[in-house]
């Protein structure tokens, strides 16, 4: 069995460990956990390195636990944040937790007999505490000096907004999670992003202090692009793993746009391709960067992994539609996502059905007049849903209006116009 820490180092995913003894510990099967706070209804690409790393642990023979923070989500992890998170209601946290469970189930099989993966929610144990009981059982074992010295705490205390007492106590809650999983599940390793270092070390220390036992922490580097921007954000918007929040097309395009300087590292982090396969793609980037073969493989591998074969097929068809390919199999929502940034118009559905294509092109604003639209047809330059209109008197058939809602007009090779029927 290959050492998981060796594998993580080879893939650029080993940032730090709390104890060098972890390298020997992982040579035998152990139990490892990572936590996910339900601050949104879906995980996003910024969480994906941790999720994929849990899958790597499982492939190397270890048991993995994915913890959904049904309790800690009510507080919000201050790590890496410059301001306090907006408070969520219990109902919001429960809904978000359900979404995260669904996301995780795509990577880790929680249901199969003998599966080496388990899903837990810390509301099960943290929800039973009163404040007095928690302070007496857990809080007395923490020292203010050590808590105040943590980088995540110090940075917030020095900021204009400061840090609330609730956020300050977050590390106690996460430390108790680790202790609880150590006691109940034999969990001896916690993993997470490098911004979790303070929380992870708090748990390691608590287990050592109360149980006199060795436990370990391991962090992954935060995934940033070559310009230092945190990976998983695009113009300030998270790239979610739920296609209802980030459509298949946008998800695929996010990875397809990866810079040449980033793509090999991202292939190592987010895919299970071998080192030899990634090295071959690196040579493609060096020798023929204009082909963007590495980016295409990255986008395809990650989209298939997150959204399955169906999601990838939709993304590929939608991407091809931008270059004139047929639109069969695409739904109205897919087309609305693909052509979200092209000019659009709304026309009454009853008016569009049976209307001459030239009239629709003029009414939608693709052409300045019906005469110009007819001349465009005669020159072979007008397309409806990427199918050339060949007759000047051609009319729009009901089946051309996708889902009764959307029609895509095109002039020439790349001038698109979206028609929404109302």
Image (cartoon, rainbow, N blue to C red):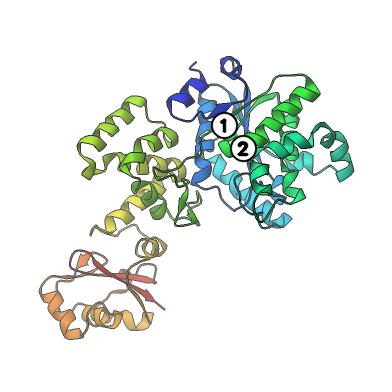
> Observer-nearest residue: 376 or 13?
13
Q: Where is the C terminus found, in terms of image quarters? A: bottom left
Q: Which mark is residue 188?
A: none
Is 249 rendered above or below residue 414? Answer: above
Instruction: Determine whether the residue tagged by mark 1 lies in a helix, strand or loop.
Output: strand
Where is mark 2, residue-wise?
A: 196
Q: Report x, y in % for residue 28.
A: 59, 15
Residue drawn at the location 16% of the way across and 85% of the way down:
371
> Observer-nearest residue: 52 or 263?
263
Separation (CA) of disc 1 from disc 2: 7 Å
Is 143 rendered above or below residue 7? Answer: below
Q: Quadrant of residue 395?
A: bottom left
Verify CB contact (< 8 Å) between mark 1 and mark 2. yes
Is residue 49 among what the camera can see? Answer: yes
Is 191 rendered above or below residue 215? Answer: below
**35 left or right, relative to 272:** right
Q: Report x, y in % for residue 54.
A: 55, 32
Q: Quadrant of residue 355?
A: bottom left
Residue drawn at the location 30% of the way across and 79% of the way down:
364
Q: Report x, y in % for residue 91.
A: 71, 56
> Observer-nearest residue: 59 or 39?
39
Q: Earlier in the sequence, mark 1 or mark 2?
A: 2
**71 left or right, relative to 342:** right
Q: Report x, y in % for residue 129.
A: 84, 42
Residue drawn at the location 35% of the way across and 45% of the way down:
258
Instruction: Determine whether the residue tagged by mark 2 lies in a helix, strand or loop.
Output: helix
Q: Which mark is residue 219?
A: 1
């Amino acid at each position: 069995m290959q050492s998981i820490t060796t594998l993580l180092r080879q893939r650029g995913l080993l940032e730090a460990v709390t104890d060098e003894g972890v390298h020997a510990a992982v040579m035998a099967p152990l139990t490892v956990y990572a936590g996910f706070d339900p601050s949104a209804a879906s995980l996003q690409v910024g969480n994906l390195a941790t999720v994929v790393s849990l899958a790597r642990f499982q492939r190397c023979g270890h048991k993995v636990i994915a913890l959904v923070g049904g309790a800690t989500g009510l507080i919000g992890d201050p790590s890496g944040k410059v301001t306090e998170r907006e408070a969520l209601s219990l109902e919001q946290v429960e809904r978000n937790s359900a979404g995260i469970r669904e996301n995780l189930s795509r990577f880790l099989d929680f249901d199969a007999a003998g599966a080496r993966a388990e899903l837990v929610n810390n509301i099960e144990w943290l929800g039973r505490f009163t404040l007095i009981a928690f302070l007496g059982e857990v809080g007395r074992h923490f020292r203010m000096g050590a808590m105040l010295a943590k980088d995540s705490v110090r940075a917030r205390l020095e900021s204009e907004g400061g840090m609330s007492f609730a956020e300050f106590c977050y590390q106690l809650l996460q430390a108790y999670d680790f202790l609880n999983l150590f006691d109940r599940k034999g969990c001896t390793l916690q993993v997470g992003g490098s911004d979790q270092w303070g929380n992870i070390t708090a748990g390691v220390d608590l287990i050592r202090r109360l149980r006199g036992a060795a436990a370990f922490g391991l962090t992954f580097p935060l995934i940033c692009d070559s310009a230092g921007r945190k990976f998983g954000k695009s113009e300030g918007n998270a790239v979610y793993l739920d296609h209802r929040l980030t459509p298949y097309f946008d998800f695929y395009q996010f990875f397809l746009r990866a810079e040449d300087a980033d793509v090999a590292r991202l292939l190592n982090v987010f895919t299970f391709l071998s080192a030899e396969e990634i090295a071959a793609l690196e040579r493609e980037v060096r020798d023929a960067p204009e082909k963007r073969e590495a980016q295409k493989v990255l986008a395809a591998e990650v989209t298939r992994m997150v959204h399955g074969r169906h999601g990838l097929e939709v993304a590929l068809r939608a991407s091809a539609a931008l270059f004139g390919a047929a639109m069969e199999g695409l739904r109205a929502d897919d087309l609305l996502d693909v052509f979200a940034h092209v000019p659009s118009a709304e026309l009454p559905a009853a008016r569009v059905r049976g209307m001459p294509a030239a009239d629709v092109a003029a009414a939608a604003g693709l052409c300045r007049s019906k005469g110009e639209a007819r001349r465009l047809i005669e020159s072979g330059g007008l397309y409806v849903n990427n199918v050339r209109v060949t007759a000047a008197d051609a009319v729009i058939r009901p089946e051309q209006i996708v889902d009764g809602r959307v029609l895509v007009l095109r002039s020439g090779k790349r001038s698109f116009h979206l028609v929404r029927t109302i």
